[in-house]
Image (cartoon, helix red, strand yellow):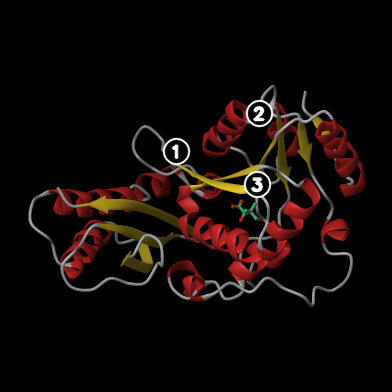
Amino acid sequence: MADLIVSPQELRRRVAAWRREGQTLGFVPTMGALHEGHLSLVRQARTECKRVVVSVFVNPSQFGPGEDFSRYPRTLEEDRRLCDPLADVVFTPTVEAMYPSAQEVWVEPGPSARGLCGAFRPGHFRGVLTVVAKLFHMVDPDITYFGSKDYQQGVLVKQMVRQLGFPLEVRLCPTVREPDGLAMSSRNRYLSPAQRAQALCLIRGLRAAERLALGGGRPEVGALKAAVAAEVAKVPEAKVDYIEIVHPESLEPLTGAMRGEALAALAVRIGTTRLIDNLLLRTA
Ligand code: PAF
């Protein structure tokens, strides 16, 4: 079994010992409730690095009031089992260790956090970047691995690493999907069987936009959005937070005819569960 380490000091000692032996370190930050999406990141880390640390920490500062912090699934024993034999250490710091006093100093994201999820979850990405920065200091990895389902998070972490000079590489890895296309997410376990079927409207919408993009010519961004919206609208239970077509790096909303690559992204609530997904669109 991967070693369970709770104390940041103990983790630092372990990492220092690896470093003395010249070993490289891969890091996968998670909030637990691990699924194949997470495990694909751990596997990628395993292929590139001698040592692998997975953190499991449900970060209170990235949840807004009324969001699912208290009911977020906590499945540590199962997570540890799933990490075996891929990870060397599962790091599960306490809230007290991560936030020893009321947080006053934050990593504030830039304009790329204004749209998409940032517009609907005020303070969310500030909480994410702040905890990720703390984890990077504790783990001190060579390479860190994030999933593309949380595309905006990945872009913001890359910006933080570049602009604050963290000496590490960020890999944004492909979204892992269920056989029917639903993006894997820890929140999928909130869905009833009926809602699980309704949730397919996200990927159906994205694929409709993809077909339009590949269909020839340069489709209008408005038409791409409408193609996503039409699929989502077939499920009356699905409540849209946003459907956007944005530039894949700046995340600025695009207008006019599609040029080069574009990211189609959406957030939809099915009952009380908020799901997100995205797809990179290319013209034929
Ligand atoms: O993607 C997540 O699970 C979280 O946002 C992260 C990166 C572990 C920070 O808490």
Mark 1 crowd level (few <14, some 14–19, many ≥20, 10 Å Cα) = many
| Among the two numbered marks 1 and 3 on one chain, the one whose residue lies closer to the N terminus | 3
Mark 1 and mark 3: span between their CA atoms? Answer: 15 Å
Instruction: Give, as a three-letter code, the residue at label 1.
Output: Val
Residue 228: numbered disc: none
Q: Which residue is under mark 1?
A: 176
- The quarter of the picture where residue 6 lies is top right
The 10 Å Cα crowd at callout 3, few under 14, some 14 to 19, many 20 or more, is some
Location of residue 234 with respect to 180 vertically, above or below: below
Q: Position of residue 44 (x, y in %)?
A: 55, 32
**Which residue does the image show at 25% across and 63% down from the upper left?**
229
Q: Secondary structure at mark 3?
A: strand
- In the rendered image, the quadrant that contains the N terminus is top right
Which numbered disc, 3 or 2, marks the residue that appears first in the sequence?
A: 3
Mark 2, Cα crowd under 10 Å, few <14 / some 14-19 / many 20+, is some
Q: Residue at x 71, y 44 (%)?
A: 141
Q: Which mark is residue 82?
A: 2
**Visible residue check, residue 70:** no
Mark sitting on residue 30: 3
Position of residue 271 measured from the top left corner of the image (x, y, whole percent): 46, 60
Q: Residue at x 70, y 24 (%)?
A: 84
Determine which quarter of the picture holds residue 160: bottom right
Discs 3/2, front = 3
**Residue closest to the far left:** 217
Q: Are marks 2 and 1 in contact (CB under 8 Å)?
A: no
Which numbered disc flags the more N-terminal residue, 2 or 1?
Answer: 2
**Residue 138 in the image: above or below residue 162:** above
What residue type is disc 2 on?
Answer: Leu
Q: Nearer the viewer, residue 67 or 96?
A: 96
Q: Secondary structure at mark 2?
A: helix
Ligand 1 neighbours mark 3 (CB distance < 8 Å):
yes
